[in-house]
């Protein structure tokens, strides 16, 4: 029978989890129950689960825990041994259906109300991802239900329905379900992975199993773009996966032993299954890669072809593409760029036609429908600045333009190796933004990551604009220990005049050099262009006054640079005696390439450029991130 289980409101789950962290197992055992004032149910879909059924479920799982040492601290493999029978109980006996199993609030009820003592025994630190339902793939009980659901073989003899549960360890299964969602969403594929893996002879003396599994799954991720695994029969899929696993072993064994693509460590040809030439995996623009000058290669072999194993990135709220471009220059392969604005998407596609551009609101995106988001190394987001600026009234997360919560939810679904959020520098320090910072910290904890805050001044990296960018970077502790913020180059940034002299003189303005000599310092902060603010200009009155002191009229954006008839006059009102900047010139001040074509009308184009992250800044940060991951 399909049951509707109680769900626990997130605020109550947070409070209960905080209390649980300060409690002993005995105290938690006394608090265990089957109801709470903050419970609620789905309106339709089944009947409400009887309390007697919940009691039976608790007693069954508590019995397994007792068999494995509860309430004493678990030793060695006892915890993983506990997981296997509990996964079977949850899937076979609980009455939880898939529609309920995807709901984190339901799992929060089971871990914090029904079985808080068992949850605390299994994961003593009680991270939010383990008990609060923020990530089902990591939840103490939710992950086990899905593990059983994916390996459950209805065609197997009765006693063997869950025989595959014990084949993979938790960390190995997490690689499939938690970190490679597009693979874990297919029970047909998961069962094939387990069958092939169980039958394989992994030479552990030469290469660690976890490395083989990671390489195996990454190859399957690439192959999924070209092969419909679900359309293959069981035999065909198993054979395909055996080939991929053999290739993974070949590559890693050569890497461990210093061999080449053509010879094994003894100099002999390495025998391995190969695909027919007609089934070779395509390599090139389909994968969204750009080969960088001086790239040492570092690829893996796919049936005689070489595919780069560069780290991958997805940029949401990508805008004009400055941050994505910088990370690409650092060495990342851009798997997808997402933005709600149609003109921004047109700009991205125009300049990088091989990037996968998604025109959508990230608050509505379902990551499971976008395979390119799965298994990504870096998820980055240049958050809209307006909700955090004085001009935008600093409404933060209550501003409908804010994308922070959506970005954090995507991070929990995608589980990137690194999360990067960019915004104004005061985002990290202003007391008005304590709640957004708390949400970021919670998400980092749920991912099991450490969080670092930092600010980078554009002029420190030879970008001709006085603009400070704030960054939040989250990654695993072992990677964070290797991470450091980029350091200034020590060389002065070009001045406003030096940067724009060529363009100012492009139409024959005779005073261009005179103007450039006066504009002898980096440009002021580029502001303006916010959504809903009106036309394109260089910001509020104070900002326009700063631009006037630098020889630029900030009341509007020009269509063209000055021509031969324009007269520079510093004594008349600025609108009559100072040149206007064009969108293309502002793009140069942001460090975008000269040939980076901005799509859309002037107001839209300026909005894209004014809110950009300078590519060079992202490049330097990206290089430090890659060094930390390596």
Image: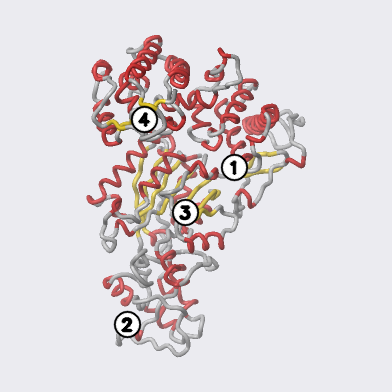
Q: Which mark is residue 360?
A: 3
Above or below, 596 against 164 in this view is: below
- Is label 2 or label 4 in front? 4
The residue sitting at 26% across, 71% down in the picture is 542
Residue beneath disc 4: 106
CB within 8 Å, label 3 to label 1: no
In 3D space, how far apart are the residues under numbered discs 4 and 1 (Cα atoms)? 39 Å
Residue beneath disc 1: 309
First in sequence: mark 2 vs mark 3:
3
First in sequence: mark 4 vs mark 3:
4
First in sequence: mark 2 vs mark 4:
4
Q: Is residue 499 visible in this depiction of the protein?
A: no
Residue beneath disc 2: 574
Locate residue 198 relative to residue 428 in the image: left or right: right
Question: In which quarter of the view is residue 437 placed?
Answer: top left
- Is label 4 or label 3 in front? 4
The residue sitting at 38% across, 17% down in the picture is 57
Q: How packed is label 4: few (under 14 Cα within 10 Å), some, or many (20 or more)? A: many
Which structural element holds mark 3?
A: loop
First in sequence: mark 2 vs mark 1:
1
């Amino acid at each position: 029978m399909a049951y509707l289980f109680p769900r626990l409101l997130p605020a109550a789950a947070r409070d209960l989890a905080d209390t649980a962290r300060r409690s002993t197992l005995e105290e938690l055992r006394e608090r265990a129950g089957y109801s709470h004032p903050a419970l609620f149910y789905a309106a339709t879909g089944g009947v409400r689960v009887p309390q007697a059924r919940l009691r039976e479920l608790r007693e069954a799982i508590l019995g397994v825990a007792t068999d494995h040492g509860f309430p004493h601290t678990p030793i060695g493999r006892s915890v993983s041994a506990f997981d296997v029978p509990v996964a079977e109980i949850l899937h076979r006996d609980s009455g939880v259906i898939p529609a309920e199993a995807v709901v984190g609030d339901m799992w929060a009820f089971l871990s914090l109300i029904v079985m808080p003592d068992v949850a605390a025994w299994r994961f003593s630190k009680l991270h939010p991802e383990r008990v609060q339902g923020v990530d089902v793939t990591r939840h103490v009980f939710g992950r086990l239900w899905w593990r059983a659901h994916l390996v459950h073989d209805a065609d197997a003899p009765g006693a063997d329905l869950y025989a595959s549960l014990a084949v993979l360890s938790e960390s190995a299964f997490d690689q499939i379900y938690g970190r490679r969602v597009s693979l874990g969403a297919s029970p047909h594929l998961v069962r094939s992975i387990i069958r092939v893996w169980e039958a394989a002879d992994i030479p552990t003396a030469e290469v660690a199993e976890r490395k083989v599994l990671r390489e195996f799954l990454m190859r399957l991720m690439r192959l999924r773009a070209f092969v419909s695994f679900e359309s293959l029969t069981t035999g065909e899929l198993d054979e395909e996966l055996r080939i991929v696993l053999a290739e993974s072993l070949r590559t890693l064994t050569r890497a461990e032993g210093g061999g080449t693509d053509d010879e094994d460590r003894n100099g002999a040809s390495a025998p391995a299954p190969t695909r027919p030439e007609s089934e070779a995996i395509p390599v090139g623009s389909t994968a969204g890669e750009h080969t960088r000058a001086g790239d040492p290669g570092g690829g893996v072999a796919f049936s005689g072809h070489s595919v780069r194993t560069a780290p991958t990135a997805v940029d949401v709220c990508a805008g004009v593409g400055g941050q994505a471009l910088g990370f690409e220059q650092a060495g990342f392969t851009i798997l997808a760029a997402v933005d709600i604005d149609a003109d921004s998407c047109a700009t991205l596609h125009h300049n990088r036609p091989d990037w996968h551009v998604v025109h959508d609101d990230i608050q509505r995106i379902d990551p499971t429908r976008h395979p390119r988001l799965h298994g990504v190394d870096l998820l980055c987001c240049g958050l809209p600045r307006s909700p955090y600026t004085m001009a935008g009234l600093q409404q933060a997360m209550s501003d409908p333009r804010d994308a922070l919560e959506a970005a954090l939810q995507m991070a929990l679904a995608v589980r990137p190796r690194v999360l990067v959020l960019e915004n104004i520098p005061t985002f990290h320090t202003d007391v008005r933004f304590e709640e957004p910072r708390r949400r970021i910290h919670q998400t980092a904890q749920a991912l099991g990551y450490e969080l670092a805050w930092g600010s980078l001044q554009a002029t420190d990296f030879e970008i001709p604009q006085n603009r400070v960018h704030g960054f939040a970077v989250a990654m695993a502790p072992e990677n964070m220990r290797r991470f450091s913020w980029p350091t200034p180059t020590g060389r002065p940034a070009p001045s406003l005049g030096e940067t724009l002299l060529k363009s100012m003189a492009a139409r024959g303005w005779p005073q261009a050099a005179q103007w450039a000599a006066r504009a002898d310092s980096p440009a002021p902060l580029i502001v303006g262009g916010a959504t809903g603010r009106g036309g394109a200009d260089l910001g509020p009155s104070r900002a326009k006054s700063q631009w006037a002191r630098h020889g630029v009229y900030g009341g509007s954006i020009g269509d063209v640079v000055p021509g031969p008839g324009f007269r520079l006059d510093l004594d008349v009102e600025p609108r009559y005696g100072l040149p206007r900047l064009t969108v293309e010139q502002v793009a140069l001040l942001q460090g975008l390439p000269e040939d980076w074509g901005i799509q859309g009308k002037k107001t839209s184009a300026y909005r894209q450029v004014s809110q950009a992250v300078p590519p060079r800044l992202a490049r330097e940060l990206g290089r430090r991130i890659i060094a930390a991951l390596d």
